[in-house]
Image: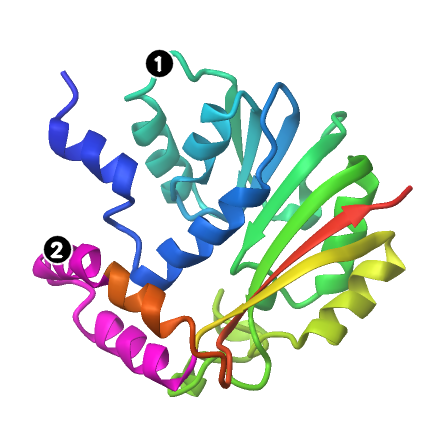
Amino acid sequence: MFSIRKLISDKFVVSHRTSNWLQHRLMERYYINGPINSLAIGTGGGPEVLRLSERGNFVTAVEHDALAKDGISKQMARYPDLDKWNCEVTAIEDFATSKFYHFVLMSQVLEHIQNDDQVIQKLSSITAPHARLIISTPTSLDGLLGRESIVVPVATGPDHVRVGYQGPELDFICTRFNFFLIKRFYLGNPLLATWLLFEEKHAHNNLMKIINLIARPLVLSLSLWRYRSLIQISIYTRMH
C-alpha cells in the first residue's frame, strides 16, 4: 500500500527547493497534452516524468546515473495506470533512439555539459518539425550569485562547467540547429539568492521540507523583483 505521505509529496513536490518548484510551475504551462513522444533529460529523479505522463505523453527519461532512474521508478510505481514511460541511463550525447520527439524538457542540465552545441545538435536530429524545447539554465552574469565556487574544471566531476548562459548566447547555439525562441522568463534576484543559500545550508534538515512549503508564497513574491536574475527559462520551437 502506498503511503499518503508519498502521494502528497508527489502532488506538492515537497522534495523540491522553492526555486525549482517555481521554475516547474512556470514551465508546466508549456507542456503539451496528448499522446506525443516526450523527452525529459536529467531530471535527477524529479517529478517531470510523472507530470508529463499525467498529460498522456509517452515519456522517455535520459539520466546520467542509475540512482536517478531508481528514483523515477519508485515514484512511478505509485501510479500503475501511467505506464507509458521508460528511462535510459546514458549521457544525452550517446542516447540512441529511432523515435522522433515532439517535446523536450532540459532543466538545469546544459550548464553541466562541456559540449553543449553537440547536445543541441543531437536534439535537433531526434525531434519532429515544430517540436517544443524547454531549457532552464542559470544566467551567466548572476546565475550562481554567492555560489561561484561550484564551477569546476570538467575533469573534476559532474558539476557546472560554466556559470550559465545569457539569452542571446543560448539563442545563438539553438538557432544553428533550427530551434527558434518563442518565449523567455527570468527569475530570481539577490534576495532570492540569499534564500537559496539558506536552503542549501540546511538541505539535510527534514524541517526544511515544511519550511519550503510555507515559504512558497514568499518566493512567488520575491520573484516579482526583476533585478540580477539568477535563472532563465527559454522555450523554443523547431522550425524544420
* Magenta highlight range: 189-215
Residue found at the far right of this picture: 240
Label 2, label 1: how many angstroms apart (C-alpha)?
Answer: 28 Å
Q: What residue would you read off at disc 2?
A: 210
Give coordinates of residue 198: x percent, y percent.
22, 77
Q: Which mark is residue 115?
A: none
Q: Residue at x 36, y 80 (%)?
A: 193
**Vertical placement of 68 versus 23: above or below?**
above
Q: What secondary structure is marked by label 1? A: loop
User: In the shown orientation, is residue 11 left or right of residue 101?
Assistant: left
How crowded is the residue under tag 1: few (<14 C-alpha within 10 Å), some, or many (20+)?
few
User: In the shown orientation, is residue 110 left or right of residue 120?
Assistant: left
Give coordinates of residue 238: x percent, y percent.
82, 45
Q: Quadrant of the N terminus?
A: top left
Secondary structure predominantly adopted by residues drawn in magenta = helix
Q: Residue at x 23, y 70 (%)?
A: 199
**Vertical placement of 119 versus 54: above or below?**
below
Give coordinates of residue 126: x percent, y percent.
78, 37
Residue type at mark 2 is Ile
How crowded is the residue under tag 2: few (<14 C-alpha within 10 Å), some, or many (20+)?
few
Magenta stretch: includes residue 211? yes
Which of these two is toward me, 154 or 208?
A: 208
Q: What residue would you read off at disc 1?
A: 80
**Vertical placement of 72 versus 83: above or below?**
below
Q: Residue at x 75, y 74 (%)?
A: 168
Residue type at mark 1 is Pro
Q: Residue at x 20, y 65 (%)?
A: 203
Q: What secondary structure is marked by label 2? A: helix
Query: Where, by quadrant of the figure, is residue 149 drawn?
Result: bottom left
